[in-house]
Image (tube, helix red, strand yellow):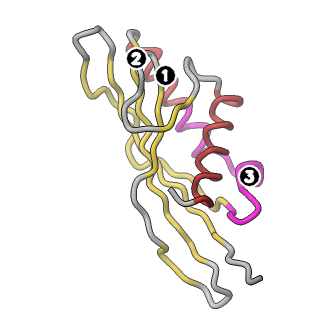
Amino acid sequence: MSSFIDGIMQSIADYIDTEVEPYASIVFGSDPPDGGICMIQGSSAPTDTHLDKGMIYRIPVVLNGKNKNQAVLLDDLTAIHVALTRKTDYSGLSTADCQIVDIATTAAPSIIGREQNSQWVCGSSFEVTIYWSIEED
């Protein structure tokens, strides 16, 4: 991940951990640990470039979880999506270089399957739209 996207991803993970308080803290990666929740950025590129050399990015983010309790897993991932998509003021999540414009669910949490160790696996995704301001030195 590039550094400006790292900052946005970390601020979203911190918000989830402190405001939603899911059953496990967010870790970065594609496969959640047992009883855990993970988040990873998908590939993205600027969708618009502006005359001031700023760019609009749409960053796809995968949010997966594992838990022995299917209800806890679905409830917490759903609560994360609700908190992020209903939020109207992203100033606390934005960084010095990037402003979050919107967060929208692209795939609601759903059960993918159950592992042999009795962990239910749930997958979901959302898209973060940011404006990246490129400042000249």
Discs 3/2, front: 2
Q: Say what amino acid the circle numbered 2 marks.
A: Asp
Callout 3: SS: loop
| In the rendered image, the vertical position of residue 115 relative to residue 39, given as above or below | above
Is 21 on the left-hand or right-hand side of 82?
A: right
Q: Say what amino acid the circle numbered 3 marks.
A: Asp
Q: Residues within 10 Å of mark 1 (few under 14, many from 20)?
A: few
Residue picked out by circle 2? 34
**First-in-chain label (2 vs 1):** 2
**What segment carries the magenta color?**
80-99
Tag shown at residue 75: 1
Q: Residue furthest front?
A: 137
**First-in-chain label (3 vs 2):** 2
Residue 82 is inside the magenta segment:
yes
Q: CA distance from mark 3 to mark 2?
A: 33 Å
Q: Nearer the viewer, residue 124 or 97?
A: 97
Discs 2/1, front: 2
Name the residue located 73 percent from the left edge and 79 percent from the top edge.
Answer: 135
- Quarter in which the C terminus is drawn: bottom right
Q: Nearer the viewer, residue 6 or 129?
A: 6
Q: CA distance from mark 2 to mark 1?
A: 17 Å
| In the rendered image, the vertical position of residue 4 relative to residue 88, given as above or below | below
Is 89 on the left-hand or right-hand side of 1?
A: right
Residue picked out by circle 3? 89
